[in-house]
Image (cartoon, grey):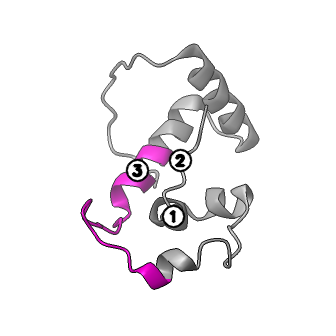
Amino acid sequence: MRTSEARVQTAFRLRPSLIAKLKREAEKQHDSLNGYVENILERHVELEWPRIPADFKVSDIVLSMNGSIPMPSKEELEDDPRMAHILGYAYED
C-alpha cells in the first residue's frame, strides 16, 4: 500500500545474497528496491496471520493423511502468503 506519507530513513544490515535476490525481484515487479521491500513489510504486518499455539496437538487422523493431499507448488505458495504461513513453508535463500 503506497501512500504519500513521509518516509523515515533507516538502515538494516542484510546479507549480500539477500539484497541481490530482493533487487532481482524488485526489477521483475518494475519497482525500486526500497518500494519493493516496503511493500513486502506492509503486506506482512497487515495480514492477520493465524495464531496456532506451539503445543497444538494435531489429531492422528490428520497426521495419517500425510501425502494424500498434494502440496501446492512454490508459485502457488508465493502467490498466497497466508497458505504458505499456515503450511509452514519458509522461503530459503
Residue plotted at (32% across, 37% down): 6
**Does the magenta segment cover residue 54?**
yes
Residue at point 51% right, 31% down? 34
Residue 73 got which mark? none
Q: CA distance from mark 3 to mark 2?
A: 18 Å
Residue named by callout 1:
87
Q: Quadrant of residue 91?
A: top right
In magenta, the rendered stretch is 40-61
Q: Which residue is mark 2?
A: 90
> Callout 1: 10 Å neighbours few (<14), some, many (20+)?
few
From this view, report whether residue 63 is shown above or below residue 38. Answer: below
Give the mark toward the camera: 3 or 2: 2
Q: Amino acid at mark 3?
A: Glu
Please state which of residues 29 and 4 is positioned toward the viewer in this rendering: 29
Instruction: Give the label on residue 42, or none.
Output: 3
Q: Is residue 70 left or right of residue 4?
A: right
Q: Is residue 79 left or right of residue 28?
A: left
Report the amino acid beneath label 2. Ala
Instruction: Give the residue type that dot 1 points to.
Output: Leu
Q: CA distance from mark 3 to mark 1?
A: 21 Å
Magenta region includes residue 80: no
